[in-house]
Image (cartoon, coloured by chain):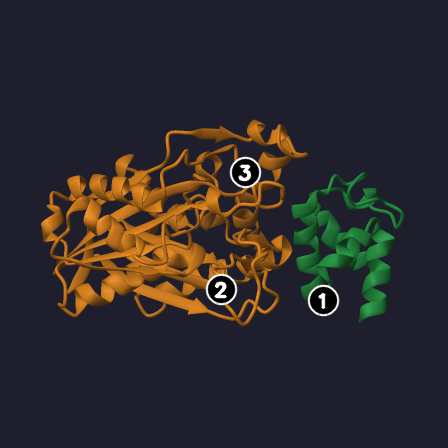
Chain colours: A orange, B green
Amino acid sequence: MYGKIIGTGFYVPDNKVPNEFFESIMETNDEWISSRTGIKSRYFSKGENTSDLGTKAAEIALADSGLSPEDLDIIIFATMTPDTFMPSTACLVQKKIGAVNAFAFDISAACSGFMYALAVAKEFLENGKVKNALVIGGEVMSKALDFTDRGTAVLFGDGAGAVVLQRSEEPGIINSYLGSRDDVKGSLVLKALPVDNPFVSNENDTNKMTMDGREVFKFSKQVIMDTIDKVLEGTGYNYDDIKMIIPHQANTRLIDYAIDKNDKLKDKFYINVDRFGNTSAGSIAIALSEVRQKKLVEAGDLVILVGFGGGFTWGSLLIKM
Amino acid sequence: MEQRIKEILAEELSVDIEEIKLETSLKDDLNADSIDMMQVVDVLEQEFGVEVDTSELANIITVADIVNYIESHK
């Protein structure tokens, strides 16, 4: 049995923010940002939280699938910017869409989160524990950004994507591969609650995301191609069989550098970071939804999703659409 | 080593190797931006087996700075 994609959807806040916006709040400009990152604009929330974005994406994906909310058995939400630590963002979505028969939980694997969530859903679907799954990747990154740091503030965006999967005898998700290792130098950090109790004081701790761009660059370069190769291993498929590769949308310069020596793969990479920025766990989910909506992939096409990010974490899926 | 460094710079920055002298500034003369620098340093690290600390990147201005850095850290 397989987990097969039967519906997708994505949603971003109705507030498009071009690079020029940052010129008024920090020393940067459109040319600087776009030449180094490929990003031209992103969307920032004007109040909607992560569960709101996820709910809208889920409703579109459900409509696309033809299922009702009551048909869902499991809801997994990948995010590092939850509305609340408790309840989980997945439970908030469950309530908002009325998925009364599902069990719901969040997964934390930063920009690889959607890969981790899909891989977990795949296992539940294959072992027969569930029939219908809703997997969401979404973030309101603008909550976590330090708007005085031009090295990070310009890179990220808000948005969510959702996928509905169904247990199927026809191939869907063919293979998954996940990995992680210690980010020794703390190059990608978003702090949670500090230990601040009657025995210790830590109330001034910052809760904004920090990044060491060069360490992240090195890490990403090391894992992107390897993670693509690993998910093909043992499947009998090779590069030529793949219609499209949807990478985590971090930075076009980085992706170009990582695939430098693989010219025949280059044209297969789908890029939309120019319009959305890096939406972390949302990015691959949004891109997957977009390529289905635009009919850039058809039933039967093989697609690889590849994520990489904080943790460090990485992961990939080989999917027959 | 100097020749090899020039070859790497020419390749990574897509410039003519004849343009690269010891006193050439990576940023001003070869138009290398911060992402280019990460890319160049990544290749240099693999080629020469050195590790360039991120904080040292700001001190690398010219081709000669790269040569000196690698020689003193080998």
Q: Quadrant of residue A258?
A: bottom right
Where's residue A115, x and y in %?
35, 58
Res A64 label: none
Residue type at mark 1: give it.
Answer: Glu
Distance CA(mark 1)–CA(mark 2): 22 Å
**Are marks 3 and 2 in one subunit?**
yes
Residue A311 got which mark?
2
Q: Is residue A18 above or below residue A316?
A: above
Q: Residue at x 71, y 58 (%)?
A: B54
Mark 3 highlights which residue?
A: A38
Q: Residue at x 69, y 46 (%)?
A: B34
x then y, percent, for residue A4: 19, 55
Q: Dot 3: what SS?
A: loop
Q: Are marks 3 and 2 in contact (CB under 8 Å)?
A: no
Chain assignment, label 2: A
Q: Earlier in the sequence, mark 3 or mark 2?
A: 3
Marks 1/2 same chain: no
> Which residue is labeled 1 in the image?
B51
- Looking at this view, name the residue that lies furthest to the front: A198
The quadrant of the picture occupied by the N terminus of chain A is bottom left
Furthest-right residue in view? B23
Kind of residue indicated by mark 3 = Gly
- Seen in the picture, residue A137 relative to A229 is either above or below; the reply is above
Which amino acid type is shown beneath numbered disc 2?
Gly
Q: Residues within 10 Å of mark 2 (few under 14, many from 20)?
A: many
